Amino acid sequence: MARFIDHTLLKPFATSEDIAKLCAEAAQYRFRSVCVNGSWVSVCKELLAETDVGISAVVGFPLGASATRVKAHEAAAAVDDGATEIDMVMPIGAVLEGRYGVLMYDVSAVVRAVEGAAIVKVILETGYLDDVQKAEACRVAEAAGAHYVKTSTGFGAGGATVEDVLLMRGAVTSAIGVKASGGIRDAETAVRMLRAGANRLGTSAGVAIVSGRSSGAAPASSRGEGPEASLQY
């Protein structure tokens, strides 16, 4: 299970001590990667230097509303600092309006910016979309060169569902992966996502999932994860 998990810490008040703990847990349990904000990538690179744990950096997070050139620059900077994977938020408003050319341009620019040095995962934020929009966004993201499509940021409306994972898996080819994230707090939920077709899981409860312990979720007011804070990424 651990090798499917991106061990995640994206809260805005994360400290150096928090990041060190995240990396120590990732090394101990051999999670696939740590997923952090860009400012922490170089720290993670140093802490994980003697491990096989990757580093995922979020881009345009959590709104997806940054200018495309800013997303591309942010992705390139994260790779320069040591990121091996980029989790970018798509331009949600454009997709809601049916402007899929904007999505194609946005994803293509980030893919080009990392020049094969990192894989790119495109976050749809499925809680804002209908099924037609989800499926078409997946197809466009794949055509633009994305390596994964991903359900949610964990900061928006809703989180990962089995139904969305099934839909997204059916919308793309076997050449790219599906990442489920948002509200995955226990092993039972994690297994359901994998069985539905997810190839990767994004969660801040990785230790609880692989150890069988309670996630011990903190009160929503203390986590700083937006109006849907009870989900936890």
Image: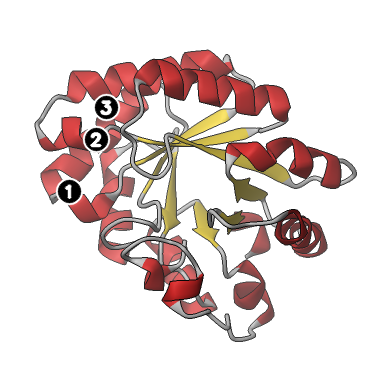
Does 47 appear above or below 11? Answer: above
Residues under numbered marks 3 and 2 in contact, where contact means CB atoms less than 8 Å apart: yes
Name the spot of residue 181 as percent of width and height, x first.
Answer: 43, 57
Circle 2: element type: helix
Query: Which residue is under mark 1?
Result: 129
Does 24 appear above or below 191? Answer: above
Amino acid type at mark 2: Ala
User: Callout 3: few (<14), some (14-19), or many (20+) C-alpha neighbours within 10 Å?
Assistant: many
Dividing the picture into quarters, in which one does residue 78 lie?
top right
Amino acid type at mark 1: Leu
Circle 1: element type: loop
Q: Distance between the residues labelled 1 and 2?
A: 10 Å
Circle 3: element type: helix
Instruction: In the rendered structure, find residue 204 and report the number of the disc placed on it.
Output: none
Query: Which residue is under mark 3?
Result: 140
**Residue at the left extreme?**
97
Name the spot of residue 41 as percent of width and height, x first.
Answer: 69, 38
User: 60 or 176, which is in the foreground?
Assistant: 60
**Residue at the right extreme?**
50
User: 48 or 230, which is in the foreground?
Assistant: 230
Amino acid type at mark 3: Val
User: Callout 2: few (<14), some (14-19), or many (20+) C-alpha neighbours within 10 Å?
Assistant: many
Query: Which residue is under mark 2?
Result: 137
For discs 1 and 2, the disc positioned in front in the rendered view: 1
Does 219 appear above or below 65? Answer: below
Rendered residue at 43%/28% (across/down): 146
Q: Which of marks 1 and 2 is nearer the N terminus?
A: 1
Residues under numbered marks 1 and 3 in contact, where contact means CB atoms less than 8 Å apart: no
